[in-house]
Image (cartoon, helix red, strand yellow):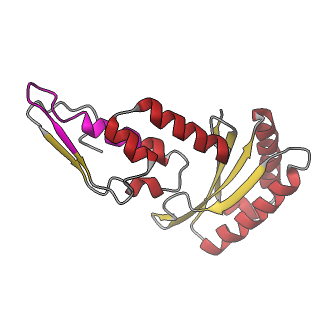
Amino acid sequence: QMIVKGHDFPKVTLVGALAADLSLFASDYRCGEQTFALLTQAAGRSGRGRLQGDVVIQTYQPDHYCIQAAAKQDYEAFYEEEIRYRTMMGYPPAENLLAVFISSADEALLETGCRYLKEYMIKAKKDIEASVIGPASPGSEKINDVYRKVIYVKTADYHDLVVLKDRTEKYIEINSGFDKMRIQFDFKPM
């Protein structure tokens, strides 16, 4: 990642991406996009001067559309597959997404708080067509002795996400059990 961030190495003629597909298994719906971007940027470091460049991609998933499109530098093919996947799964830009990040130094309190929060959100969406997913790991479950979880809400209507967030914030405010937790709302609109 450090190499691909815009550095110009004119005498580089070979770039190798080892285990290039590891980022495809991250717990983020954008992992294909991030992998594609990283591989195409890495490939762009080779052969920038007068010398011809080569790129070698080592992968356990050679047939994955992200790896195939990156190897061919085919942005349109990648976009077509990625938008098809996101539409099928209901991820942005096909639908709106709200990520509710919850963290606490007390793991048991976090588990209980997440369970209550999810149950409330399911009840609070009574007049809203939305999916509540989780709690799940946001990638790293523990950082600096703080445990972390995330709950996702997906819906086609952005306004519905705002309404559900407002209802959830009120629920958090009146329940003192959430005082020892940090809760953040992150909108990912279409």
| Residue at x-position 78% and y-position 35% | 157
On the rendered image, what quadrant is the C terminus found in? top right
On the rendered image, what quadrant is the N terminus found in? top left
Q: From what the image shows, is residue 59 above or below residue 80?
A: below
Residue 26 in the magenta stretch? The answer is: no
Would you identify the image quadrant in which residue 73 lies?
Answer: top left
Q: Position of residue 5 (x, y in %)?
A: 29, 36
Q: Position of residue 162 (x, y in %)?
A: 77, 37
Q: Nearer the viewer, residue 111 or 12?
A: 12
The mark total stands at: 0
Q: From what the image shows, is residue 8 above or below residue 167?
A: above
Q: Position of residue 140 (x, y in %)?
A: 48, 61
Image-based side of 101 in relation to 82, left or right: right
Image-based side of 40 in relation to 32, left or right: left
Q: Position of residue 97 (x, y in %)?
A: 67, 42
Q: Nearer the viewer, residue 18 or 5?
A: 18
Image-based side of 148 in relation to 88, left or right: left
Q: Nearer the viewer, residue 164 or 95?
A: 95
Q: From what the image shows, is residue 146 above or below residue 8?
A: below
Residue 49 in the magenta stretch? The answer is: yes
Would you identify the image quadrant in which residue 160 lies?
Answer: top right
| Residue at x-position 65% and y-position 67% | 110
Q: Residue furthest top?
A: 50
Q: Which residues are magenta?
A: 36-55
| Residue at x-position 80% and y-position 47% | 130
Q: Residue furthest front?
A: 63
| Residue at x-position 63% and y-position 34% | 93
Image-based side of 34 in relation to 157, left or right: left
Q: Residue furthest right?
A: 127
